Image (tube, helix red, strand yellow):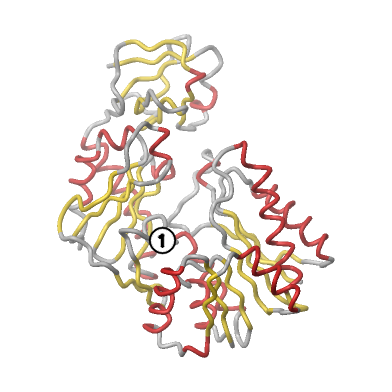
Amino acid sequence: MNRVILNKGRERSLLRKHPWVFSGAVHQIEGKPQPGETVEVFSYDCQFLGRGAYSPASQIRIRIWTFAEKEAIDEPFFVRRIKTAVSLRESLKIPEQSNAYRLVSAEADGLPGLIVDRYGDFLVCQCLSAGVEYWKDKITDQLKALNGVKGIYERSDADVRKKEALQPSCGSRWGKDPPPLIEIDEQGLKFLVDIRKGHKTGFYLDQRVNRHLIKSYSFEAEVLNCFAYTGGFGLAALKGGARHVTNVEDVAGLMDLTDKNFRINQFEKQCYTNVKANVFQLLRQYDIEGKSFDIIILDPPKFADAQSQLARASRGYKDINRLAFKLLRPKGFLFTFSCSGLVKMELFQKIVADAAMDAGCDVHVLQWLGQSPDHPVKLHIPESLYLKGLLLET
């Protein structure tokens, strides 16, 4: 077994069960591990710390599979971890809420770098680390054995693969090829999902609980759904009795799919308007025109991928929230989110508070929001909590 010895004092995070070893923590490598191969990790004084996947190109040099000295990293290991992940979703009764949900959520399920989402009879997997790439065939063998799976499609095209020196990899890995659009059901709403080219693995599964929540606030409301993607929040608002929804997205093709989603849910065209526009520019235009709304939803894409982008991201979050506050009617509701992992909840709340002050709004927090429970959060892995949000009332 290849061995990695850490520098003095750099074992503390592993003793707290955080699964990452950064390059600067490595003192010595014994052997010649190849990308993705398993290495044993020891403290400077030779205390066993864990077994993990070696990634020579990444700043995260090792991602720990197990902290148990007697647990081998082999095919039965992946059988156990995948079974545990499936059992968690079943115990939470998530398959009863939707036939689309996250099945494996990387570090939070003890499988660093592996994402598996289920859309009906199809699984979509993302292999985002050297270790998962190394074990990909064995992992596929376990996934295809799951009940009701007819096909497995790979969407390993996220930018994070570049940090692992991995090329993009997309296409069917096993079974039937998926149709161009897969119809899913989520608590009484239908959505068409493009798992080949859609954002992430095709849909924002992590917002399921928040889409359900908005129904409770939408009766007779006029709703502005910003960064609408394929209309998920807008559909939920109409399901809750909204009077009208305006969906804003700057990609024309997504507007076509939004139309299809509204039609299959039997909402008439007069119930909603799709606007192709830059959200920042449109909010400023609406402010000049004196428009206002009962509910505004801000669910933007990630603004910060690196620490160096954090200041600019903070300015962006403040700008759109300030503009949204100016467009909210009295006793209006703002659902505002950040999926940037580098923007912690405390910082996000401060940014939104500053935006409210600049807009001259007195605002109450009704709820702190997060990701759906099929995207679990490990208490000792703060990075697993990436989606944060606020439900606010003016």
Quadrant location of residue 288? bottom right
Q: Number of numbered discs present?
A: 1
Q: Residue furthest left?
A: 175
Q: Residue at x 20, y 60 (%)?
A: 149
Q: Is residue 114 above or below residue 232?
A: above
Q: Residue at x 64, y 48 (%)?
A: 313
Q: Which residue is pictured at 48% across the width and 78% down the height? A: 235
Image quadrant in which the C terminus is located? bottom right
| Coordinates of residue 145 in the picture (x, y in percent) | 18, 53
In the rendered view, does 248 fall on the left or right side of 27?
right
Amino acid type of the residue tagged 1 in the rendering: Leu
**Residue 188 percent coordinates (x, y):** 40, 79
Is label 1 in a helix, a strand or a loop? loop
Asked if residue 244 is positioned above or below residue 231 in the image, the reply reads below
Q: Is residue 323 left or right of residue 296?
A: right
* Structural crowding at the residue carrying mark 1, measured as other residues with C-alpha within 10 Å and reported as few (<14), some (14–19) or many (≥20): few
Q: Quadrant of residue 220?
A: bottom right
User: Where residue 178 appears, x then y in whole percent?
Assistant: 22, 63
Q: Is residue 391 above or below residue 33?
A: below
Say left or right for 330 vs 24: right
Front-lying residue, 112 or 153: 153
Q: Nearer the viewer, residue 89 or 137?
A: 137
Query: Residue tagged by mark 1?
Result: 92
For the N terminus, the image quarter is: top left
Residue 309's spot in the image, x, y percent? 62, 41
Would you say 59 lies left or right of 138 here? right
